[in-house]
Image: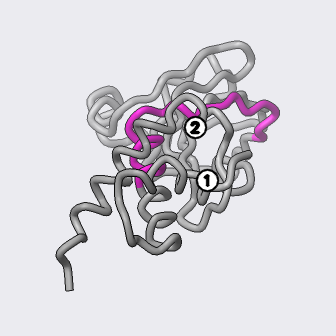
Amino acid sequence: MVRIDQWENLLSQHINGVPVPTMVDAVRAALIDFCNSTWCDSDILEGIQVDPLLAEWPVPAPQGKFPVAVLTAWIDGEEIKPKTATDLHEKYSGEWFSQRVAAAKQIFGFNCRRPGLIRLVPHLSVAKSAILEVAFQPRQNAVEVENFLYEIHGEAISYGALARLHSHINAP
């Protein structure tokens, strides 16, 4: 893990007189934007329990990370793809929220009404274990991020932080 304040050495040569906490806030915001738009920080989560009593269930996240999107899901070896609300309404005529099935083969897709929650459509009527591919971003209070974000994407993220810092230079 790399501390966010380590970006100071990439930024200090381009901007002078900016307090370190301000620089860290700009880097954190740039990291969040970068991860949110590229989905580069994704991971496969195994053994996620699907509770048939819940319409939607939370996506677990590692410490310091927030789930941005569920990219793909697998249940019983069946790949389940994301679907938009429009897709769901077209297939189920607005009744998709009440449909239940017992087999993963019968699941049309999944929908994430908001980040961090997933809803299978139709719902499973039995408990199953799922595998999820999830894209993450750092949390608003993150102090550390994955090494590859600094080593591989550090310069691009620095440009985003510099843009934020330069937009505030003449602010009162």
Residue 1's x, y, as percent?
74, 45
Q: How many residues crowd around disc 2 within 10 Å: few (fewer than 14), some, or many (20 or more)?
A: some
At a point 35% along the width and 59% down the height, the residue shown is 15
Query: Number of callouts in the render?
Result: 2
At a point 59% along the width and 67% down the height, the residue shown is 141
**SS for tag 2?**
helix
Residue situated furthest right in the rendering? 47
Amino acid type, callout 1: Gln
Q: Is residue 55 left or right of residue 166?
A: right
**SS for tag 1?**
helix
Residue 31's x, y, as percent?
47, 49
Q: Which mark is residue 6?
A: 1
Q: Which segment is the magenta one?
A: 30-49
Amino acid type, callout 2: Leu
Q: Which mark is residue 87?
A: none
Q: Is residue 167 left or right of residue 153?
A: left
